[in-house]
Image (cartoon, rainbow, N blue to C red):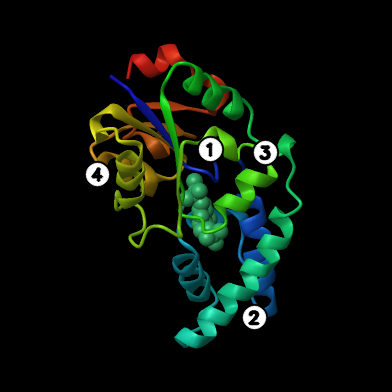
Amino acid sequence: KIKACIFDLDGVIVDTAVYHYKAWKRLANELGFDFTEEDNEKLKGVSRVASLNLILQWGDLSKTDAEKEELATRKNNWYVEMINKMTPDEVLPGAKEFVESCENAGIKTALGSASKNSRTILEKVGIAHLFDVVIDGNKVSKPKPDPEVFLKGAEELGIAPENCVVFEDAIAGVEAAINGGMKVVGIGSPDVLGKANLVINGLNEMSLEKLNKL
Ligand code: B16
Ligand code: MG
């Protein structure tokens, strides 16, 4: 029986991928190269440092750790400038409603995100109060597909992993949930997220009825 829902942030609750893309693209351009929106897909759900490493690889550049830190900070400052302007209408369709319906049904809710900026985003879009627990990039050290982020969420909620369901848009996140012994609903394409127990296009297609059938 499902007793808790754990939500990824980018791609499930909000579409911050577009802001990540703009900021990374600006950085790449300053470094003298470019990458496509298709390449950007590979950065979804991937941590900040890992994203930078991939981008530098695409530009055929190698940097010292100190230089990487400066580059990641530069990108993050642009990103933060953009997310600071986010508004409640940027919550993806049905997301707020579904999290609320969980709350009303006595199902616990947590956020499980790789982002170190998740607090700002939740507050800007006005839904921070809807999550019982927030586990994000500030609290975990092992990136998805390691299940750490979701296991910590379950632990802080006091719910066993087998009674949790994770909502994820990235393949690494779907794998992380499975590795943690949880059920998982994929948000996106069945071709990519086929390992999930159920794949839907967005939380607007989710319901408590579907949750109970997982
Ligand atoms: P930050 P999620 C992930 O969010 C993004 O999908 C990924 O593109 C980003 O690099 C990562 O967060 C870290 O974000 O730079 O803000 O710490 O899908 O795990 O909610
Ligand atoms: Mg995501």
Residue name at image x 31 percent, y 41 percent: 177
**Amino acid type of disc 2?**
Leu
Instruction: Specify few, some or many for label 3: CA neighbours under 10 Å numbering under 14, 14-19, or 20 or more.
Output: some
Closer to the camera in the image, 141 or 18: 141
Q: Is residue 116 left or right of residue 125?
A: left
**Which one is earlier in the sequence, the residue at label 1 or at label 2?**
1
Q: Is residue 37 left or right of residue 108?
A: right
Find the distance from the CA under tag 2 to the CA under tag 3. Answer: 36 Å
Ligand 1 within 8 Å of disc 4? The answer is no
**Which one is earlier in the sequence, the residue at label 4 or at label 3?**
3
Find the distance from the CA under tag 4 to the CA under tag 3. Answer: 31 Å
Using the rendered image of the protein, determine whether residue 29 is visible from the camera's viewpoint. yes
For mark 4, give the secondary structure: helix
Badge 2 is on which residue?
Answer: 31
For mark 2, give the secondary structure: loop
**Amino acid type of disc 3?**
Gly
Badge 4 is on which residue?
Answer: 179
**Taking 21 as reference, is 162 above or below it?**
above
For mark 1, give the secondary structure: loop
**Which one is earlier in the sequence, the residue at label 1 or at label 4?**
1
Ligand 2 within 8 Å of disc 1? The answer is yes
Residue name at image x 67 percent, y 55 percent: 19
| Residue 21 screen position, x and y as percent | 63, 58
Badge 3 is on which residue?
Answer: 126
For mark 3, give the secondary structure: loop
Residue 156: quadrant of the picture = top left
